[in-house]
Amino acid sequence: MSVRMKQKKHSVLVVDDDEAMREMLGSILEEAGIAAVEAASASAALQLFQEREFSAVLSDIRMPGKSGLELLGELHKLRPEIPVLLMTAFGSVDLAVEAMQEGAYHYVTKPFKRKEILLILNRAFEHSTLEEENRKLRRAVDHTSMLGDLIGESAAMRDIFALIRKIANNRSNVLLTGESGTGKEVVARTIHYVGARAEQPFVPINCTALPEGLLESELFGHVRGAFTGAHATKKGLFEHASGGTIFLDEIGDMSLALQSKLLRVLQDQEIRPVGGNQAVQVDVRVITATNRNLEKDMDEGRFRRDLFYRLNVIPIQIPPLRERPEDIRVLSEFFLRKHCGNPQVRLAPAALAKLETARWEGNARELENAIERAVALTDGVEIGAEDFPFLKVQVGVESAPTPLREENILATALTQKLTLHELEDLYISEILKFTHGNKVRAAKILGINRRTLYRRGSGSTQEGVDPDREDSASDSSKSAKLTRVSAAR
Ligand SMILES: Nc1ncnc2c1ncn2[C@@H]1O[C@H](COP(=O)(O)OP(=O)(O)OP(=O)(O)O)[C@@H](O)[C@H]1O
Ligand SMILES: [Mg+2]
């Protein structure tokens, strides 16, 4: 008893058109400390299900009106996590099999024993508690550095996660902008797969990949004989995506003629197959993406402004990777796991430091390629900085407070005839600016330990070799780094 007292009281929705059966089940449940709410038909049950919280549903299969199987389907659409148990008359094995295939949690054949029904119900409660815990756990993980396939720890990515969660369950159109390789397609997929449309199709199409006429029939379908080669009627991608999401990539490359047609589809929520005159209703969320500057395209008459407003209901701009270096560590780790079969292989701190300072003009895609290449080239269990020989290292990012350009560092050093030590101080101060004063990161990039950095970074100009230096080759490696930096521009 005391155990049960601690748990919340479970409530079961009992659905049967047979009143005597409902009453019997009701009393079995109540006796066991489970609340029973009775419904005499599937539609009454559906109503109750939407109004209250239940731990499980126990329904007869054969009922006048909607059957228990139909009810099961509708309940699952609303709350797939709530277990539904179906009852069949003795002998109707086919129905029982069908019930399980449709996703019923369990079935019982009538007549059943009191013990049997309680046992199955208790197992169902445990099962949904577990599911709930798992969901909570996933949500907790999501809140940190991952949502769907999307990885990131920067403030910018966290904002994007929050926005995706907010909009995933509605149907508003989304326009994704960002440089090539920033993850526009991953964002589009994530919006679809964390949202209410996840069970329906996600249909991506690249608007640049096809010539105009073909793209139109691909999107909207065509009737037989619409053009030479149209031997049969073909459904368009909009129809395939119905109930789900269509992802129109590189929307900026769509011709003006097709833009007008797309605008009509969005306004009327129906499509007209090429050569046909019958409109077909579609319910599709439209996500578009571009790496072009649509503002400029609109000013120059290459993109319809009215279409832009329709598409840009929810704008999501993904910043380039170089503006969110906080994401590089998690992304690198993710790509490493994706491309490396051996879970022992890891990135050396120096390698990570190098990755964190590279320019990544190709954004996450370039990072992924670099990691994939390094994985292929190394045979050890540690991937070092030297495994990324072709990386360009950047000094200073746009948002850094007036960073000196590397040419200036060298120019200053050369014109003022700085000592090596002074040049190092100059370099250290530049790196500190680059990391916005973050000494831990700066020390990592410089390849020295933090204590040394604290001493050097605080403006000490003492001559001579620092006894705290981590390795004796650090002088030459630093100057090698400087040369590489200047060669990179
Ligand atoms: N935040 C991220 N999390 C996980 N993977 C990412 C992320 N960003 C990019 N990627 C990966 O990088 C690669 C490029 O991403 P994606 O194709 O989405 O870029 P894109 O913005 O659509 O580029 P393009 O404009 O060239 O089409 C993919 O392999 C993708 O999985
Ligand atoms: Mg893309």
Image (cartoon, grey):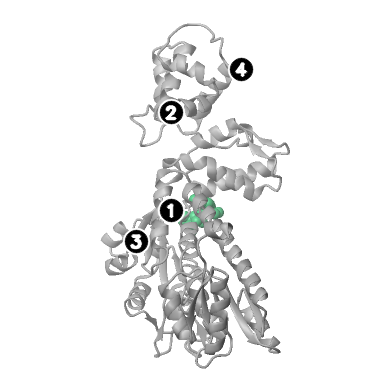
* Nearer to us in this view, 144 or 95: 95
Residue 450 x, y percent position in the rendering: 51, 21
Q: Earlier in the sequence, mark 2 or mark 1?
A: 1
Q: CA distance from mark 3 to mark 2?
A: 35 Å
Q: Nearer the viewer, mark 3 or mark 1?
A: 1
Residue 410 x, y percent position in the rendering: 43, 21
Q: Nearer the viewer, mark 4 or mark 1?
A: 1
Q: Tell me whether circle 4 and circle 1 mark residues in contact (CB < 8 Å).
A: no
- For image coordinates 36% across by 67% down, the residue present is 172
Residue 361 x, y percent position in the rendering: 47, 44
Q: CA distance from mark 4 to mark 1?
A: 42 Å
Q: Earlier in the sequence, mark 4 or mark 1?
A: 1
Q: Nearer the viewer, mark 2 or mark 1?
A: 1
Res 347 quadrant in image: top right
Residue that numbered label 3 is attached to: 314
Which disc, if any, is residue 484?
A: none
Which disc, if any, is residue 161?
A: 1
* Nearer to us in this view, 43 or 358: 43
Q: In the rendered view, tell whether residue 485 sits above or below residue 362.
A: above
The three-letter code of the residue at mark 4 reads Asp
